[in-house]
Image (cartoon, rainbow, N blue to C red):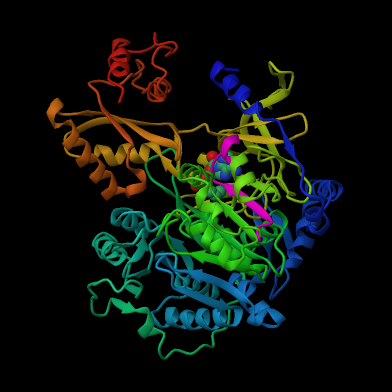
Amino acid sequence: MSSEASEKIESVLKETRLFPPPAEFVEQAHISSEEKYQEMWNRAKDQPAEFWGETAGNLHWFKKFDTVLEGEMPNTKWFTGGKINACYNCVDRHLHTWRKNKAAIIWEGEPGDTRVLTYQDLHREVSKFANVLKKLGVTTGDRVTLYMPMIPELAIAMLACSRIGATHSIIFGGFSADAVADRNNDAQSKLVITADAGWRRGKEVPLKTAVDESLEKSPSVEKVVVVRRTGAEVTMVDDRDYWWHELMEDVSADCEAVELESEHPLFILYTSGSTGKPKGVLHTTAGYLLGATMTSRWVFDLKEEDTYWCTADIGWITGHSYIVYGPLSNGATTIMYEGAPNWPDEGRFWEIVEKYQVNIFYTAPTAIRAFIKWGDEFPNKYDLSSLRLLGTVGEPINPKAWMWYYEIIGGERCPIVDTWWQTETGGCLITNLAGITPAKASWATLPLPGVQPVLVDEEGNEAKPAPTADGAVITSGNLCMKAPWPGILRTTWGDHDRCRQTYFSTYKDLYFTGDGALRDENGNYRITGRVDDVLNVSGHRIGTAEVENAINMHAGVIESAVVGYPHDIKGQGIYAYIIAEGVKPEDEERQRQNILQTVTRIIGPIAKPDKIQFVNGLPKTRSGKIMRRILRKIAEGQTDNLGDTSTLLDPAVVETIAKGKV
Ligand code: WT7
């Protein structure tokens, strides 16, 4: 094991306290005992067809499937022969129950406006908008781009797409016009749904303007639907752009949900990898929906009377699975908040928790670290006693953030579920179950039923347990999955070979997650972070190659190398080493600003480097490969212990870079 890896192990093992779930919680939990969990896990492993076949009974089928699972990774097909509709499962099936007048979505806008949609309201709006889609020429199998603020129309548009079998591709509102164009082109989207603008910290985010710009480069798009949200002035192009509210005026609220094949493409979601081009992860209808539905129930212990709030943006997978599909398929009440956590002040989230008496609250470690920085006075001002369960997702949660969340937000009363998963997995795979697994700060703990993790070394051999300095026995390796689960990605849009190469070829017969992990003697997992060139910045996945490509587009830039470094709030910050033509010391600051603008234009503000260092050369091996290990160490501030530099073409370059660290 490298010394870097063992240092990491020692530091995460320092916090060893266990926090068992309170007895009242256990009594009422969906999975309420370790025996029950073990029995489910064993059954899913030994008899997957029986286990998932029965579990699929939690969904509504127009026609039952013939086969549970066919094929091997990466070519698995689930529930073939079945006919199903995700929108029907999330909306219509509740109309025949007492839930028809239950709040499905409680929405709060950033300026303080609110809307509540019951299941019946949602059904009407979704059906009407599905008819609008049809009127605009969208049919089953077409792709539709959604580039929208966190407003109810976003959920309505998603569900309307799935109602008619159009595949949605949602693009987070923080991405640039160029990024929208690339994704439109890759998916060959026919229609874009957007808003005039969205609210963020009191300012308008000009979404329609970005769409206009993107359409100059994405010819597949024929029409645009625009929701009026902020009232911002926009240009509407005749016979291309339509107002949502006008289209909805005289359209029927009758629209049957289409009976789709189980493997019908439900959505594409673009995510970053270690190459410059984001991949369109494809999820299909039945398997994805079953995963989102069951994990919502098992992990968040969703109950009829719960008010549930996941603070993610629907532009990311967390919002797809745990604001929309998972909760609604369970008939739950899901909160949607449009804006920033610090608007009008840093107490906004806690004000919302008190106002709606939220019971289950799911957020990201980066948000928790920001709350800590803002001070306890904000949560302390509000009554948070309605909370019964807390969750985190997106990156490893450090013990300090975990303890603060447990004490200040959860009042030492609420179990915390640390849910590990990915865009590609569709739903949670490794997490503690609030009713049974004692929480261990910063450990995601156990695999859910149907999930078979394995840790392997660089060669793909199963990693061996090894004793640590303080007597624990820990296995450390790259996290892979041995068997498919229903929500596993099916392909990367338009390029199945890329999917195979990226996830299924590093290690034979295994799905490789790209993460490193530790396992203790009891089988608990602790995710240590990405082992590839992918950064996790504020819980957002950003590929270093993507940022480098954007920087290299800037005039005068010859070459660049981007690495991550530890950042107090963001988890990881972006550090860019740049070789640029003729930058004089007095011009550096201006050049930095210009480069940041270019990155914002090509990808979006989320990919802006936190630090830029201009260099004359990069540490390369004789074969021309950049030694990122060294650049990472310098960015982390470890300039005196840079390891072996003898294989470098020009070892002197390292010293110069280390001296110029910013
Ligand atoms: C990557 C996936 C899953 C929704 C949010 C991000 C990291 C995610 C955890 C966790 C440690 C985590 C991993 C993973 N990650 N959850 N609980 N503990 N790390 O989705 O953009 O697809 O990123 O986020 O590194 O590979 P994503």
Q: Where is residue 188 shown, x and y percent of the image?
A: 38, 62
Say which of 152 and 183 sits in front.
152
Q: Is residue 514 left or right of residue 443?
A: left
Q: Give percent across and percent down for residue 191.
A: 37, 70
- Work out which quarter of the rendered image holds the N terminus and state it: top right
What are the residue bounds of the magenta stretch? Answer: 386-401
Any part of residue 497 in sight:
no
Residue 641 against residue 143 in the figure, above or below: above
Q: Which image quadrant shows ligand 1?
A: top right
Residue at 57% across, 20% down: 7
Eyeballing the image, is 408 above or below 635?
below
**Quarter of the image where the C terminus is located:** top left
Q: Is residue 547 left or right of residue 119?
A: left
Res. 244 image quadrant: bottom left
Q: Is residue 196 above or below residue 573?
A: below
Q: Position of residue 512 (x, y in %)?
A: 58, 38
For the point 27% across and 38% down, the residue is 551
Residue 74 in the image, given as x and y percentages of width and height:
60, 47
Tell how many labels.
0
Whether residue 309 sits left or right of residue 627 in the image: it is right
Q: Nearer the viewer, residue 551 or 494?
A: 551
Magenta stretch holds residue 544: no
User: Quadrant of residue 199 in the image?
Assistant: bottom left
Res. 561 visible in picture: yes
- Which residue occupies the extreme top position in the image? 646
Q: Which residue is found at the position 65% from the left and 81% from the top?
A: 100
In this rendered view, identify the residue nearer to me: 294 or 120: 120
Q: Between residues 528 and 144, which one lies in front from this camera angle? A: 528
Q: Quadrant of residue 232?
A: bottom left
